[in-house]
Every structure is written in C-alpha cells, then in structure tokens.
Amino acid sequence: MGSGGEREMFQERADDAGVIIAVLSSNFIHSRTCQQQLYYCEQRKKVVPLLMEDAQIPSWLELMLHSNTYTCVNRRDYREHLPTLLQKLLDPKARQSPNSELDEARISYAVKQLKKLLKSHLCVYVCGPTLSDSIDTQVVRALGSALCEFDDVTVVTGGGYNTEYLVSHAFLEEAQQKLRPHRVWHVLPEREQEDRTVDYPQNSDRTFQVIAFGQTYFCGNSLEERDLVVSKAIEICLLIIGDADLKSVKLAQKFSWNDHYVIPFVINKNTDSSFTEQLSQGISTEDCLALNNTDQSVEARASVFHDILTRILDNLEMEHKEEASQDIVMSPPQKLPRKSPAKSGGAGTTKTSLKSVNTIIL
C-alpha cells in the first residue's frame, strides 16, 4: 500500500467514503496493494466491484467480497447501471436486505456442523479432475493405501464422478481389508440450479442423491456454497492434477485463502507439473517437487505423500495446542464462591471492595 503516509491517507479517504468503487483491472487484481486495500474497505464499507474486460476474478476475491455480482464495463447498460446502483446505496432512505449477513451465518453454521461430523485424527478433502482413461489406477490405489496407514482417518469428497471418487473408494476398500475404522464422507449441496448430471448424481429437480458408499452430508444451496463450507471446515486438501481442470484448482485456492494445507499431486506422467509449487500451501518446495516427480516409482511417491501428511499432522497438533492455550488465557475468570454472611457483629464481617477481589474494569 506504499509508505505509512500513503496508507494513512488512503484509510482516511476510505473512512470518509459512503461507498467504495473497486476498479478491478488484471494488473491490480494480482497486486499486493489490491489485497490490502480491499481487505481494509470490505471490513468497513459497501464495495462495488467494477470489472475490466480482461480481468479474471480469483477465488480469494470472490471469498472476500462475498459476491458474484460484478459490474462489468463491457455490459451495454453499465453506464446507466452504475450511477443507479450508487444512488441506491447512498440514499439514506433506502435500507438494504441483510442477505449477505444471513448467508454468512448459514454457511458458518454448516461449517460448525461439518466439523462435528469430521472429528478425526486425520481428515483430508480430496478433489481432482473428471475421470478419463488416462488416469493411472495404480497411483490411485497407492494414495488410498498411504492414507489408510494412519490412525483414525476421514476422507472427504465432493461427491462427484471425479478422481476423488476413485481415491475414496480405494481408501475405503483398503480400510475394510485391514479392518481399520476409517470413514468416507461426501459433501453435496441441497441443490444446484444448473444441470450438473454429467459430473454429479443429480436428480431432475436439481437436488442430489446419497452416494452409494460412505456417508453423505448435504449443505448449501449451490456447489459454490458447498465449496465455501468444505474449504473453511477441513484443514487439508489433496488436489489431484490430471488434465486441465480449473474447478478443482479454484477450490484448492479457497483452501489456501482459509490458510489451510494444499497438497498438489500430479497423477499422470504426461501432465505438466511445473506449476504445482504455486498451488501448494503449507508444504516445502522440496516436498512438493519430490511428490510430483513422475519419474519416481508409485511406491516412492506414495511414501513422500505419507511423510508430508505426517509433518502436517505434527504442525496441526502444535497449532491446536497454541490455540487451546490462547483460549485458556482469553477465557473469563471463574466466579468466586460466595461465603456465608457472617452473623451480625461477628469478626468475619468485612466490606467488599474492588481491591479485595481480582477484578479488571474494562
């Protein structure tokens, strides 16, 4: 955001404004300044995103603004639409519907409920490309076996006909053979207005079916809302990379934005793995390169995957301990037990003052 003086000037002007217009050009969207300024404004003001023709909206921006309604400059009526929208937002007699707040509360509740279901030592969300003949099933089985080696594991998928289906099924078969009490959950929305029958077990009324194996949890009114819930609730995402599949990459970016771990895994030798380091979150460059070295044997790559998960579990254990210690520090003091009042004239009669108890006045 520049120097301290420039930052203060920007913040003063933002504080004085009734509405913020964010002019989203391609260069600005990918700058650190964009993230800093939009974060400051979104916490305090109504933000109207004005999208330039060549700009693509990244996942972090959609999550931050909680909106898919961007005013695009290539719309024919944008010059008429923008002033009308600003007038509506600035009119003191107009009251806006609290839909965004209600949506956020609903998603937060779904996140809380999903976390209750997924109380495992290790919980991994698996997402990947659409199934094809080029998928190496040997690698899929190796991933399932590596996950099965841990104690108390839950594998979560989005319930689609994707690579995640194969991995979760292989994992569950391995667990049943080894008599391990592992679980598989599939998370699907209540409904999706678009026809997604090619990718998901969707009914004619746009609702979804229960998956044949594992357990199914329904949350959200769209696949987009479902993605918001899982990216907030689950701390580890295994992103399987096959052919070009932007939907899975976009979902993995949501996990990164929530400061969760993302493990990119290239499944086929003919897939470009040069960009995997950019998609990874919370794992070292060395681990990412070793994991996606397709010249190695399947067993060697599965071993690297197991080691990465072990280190992530160690990190999560430390993070959770730190959070627990902070909760103890921030928790309200226990009420002091009342003593029975001393009889009149007794030596135990004292006048209670603020100095006689450990009190902080805020």
Image (cartoon, rainbow, N blue to C red):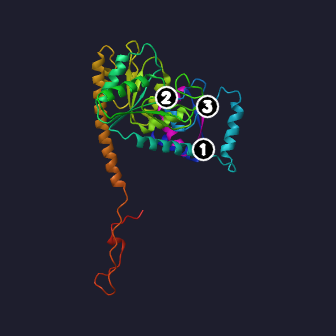
- First in sequence: mark 2 or mark 1? 2
Q: Is residue 260 above or below residue 356?
A: above
Task: Name the residue nearer the viewer: 119 or 97.
Answer: 119
Which kind of residue does numbered mark 2 sit on?
His
Task: Assign the magenta stretch its main secondary structure.
Answer: helix
Task: Name the residue nearer the viewer: 132 or 293.
Answer: 132
Where's residue 297, x and y in %?
29, 15
Residue assigned mark 1: 99
Q: Is residue 284 visible to us here?
A: no
Task: Name the residue nearer the viewer: 200 or 337.
Answer: 200
Residue assigned mark 3: 205
Q: Is residue 41 magenta?
A: yes
Residue at 40% x, 12% y is 270
Judged by depth in the image, the label closer to the viewer, 2 or 3, is 3
Secondary element type, mark 1? helix
Judged by depth in the image, the label closer to the viewer, 2 or 1, is 1
Q: Is residue 358 above or below residue 141?
A: below
Residue assigned mark 2: 30
Neighbourhood count class around disc 1 (C-alpha, 10 Å): few under 14, some 14–19, many 20 upward = few
Which kind of residue does numbered mark 3 sit on?
Asp
Where's residue 315, x and y in %?
30, 37
User: Which quadrant, please, contains the C terminus?
Assistant: bottom left
Secondary element type, mark 3? loop
For the residues bearing labels 3 and 1, Cβ distance under 8 angstroms: no
Left or right, 171 with respect to 106, comes to left
Whole-angstrom CA distance, mark 3 to mark 1, is 24 Å
Q: Which residues are magenta?
A: 26-49
For the residues bearing labels 2 and 3, Cβ distance under 8 angstroms: no
Residue farthest bottom in this picture: 345
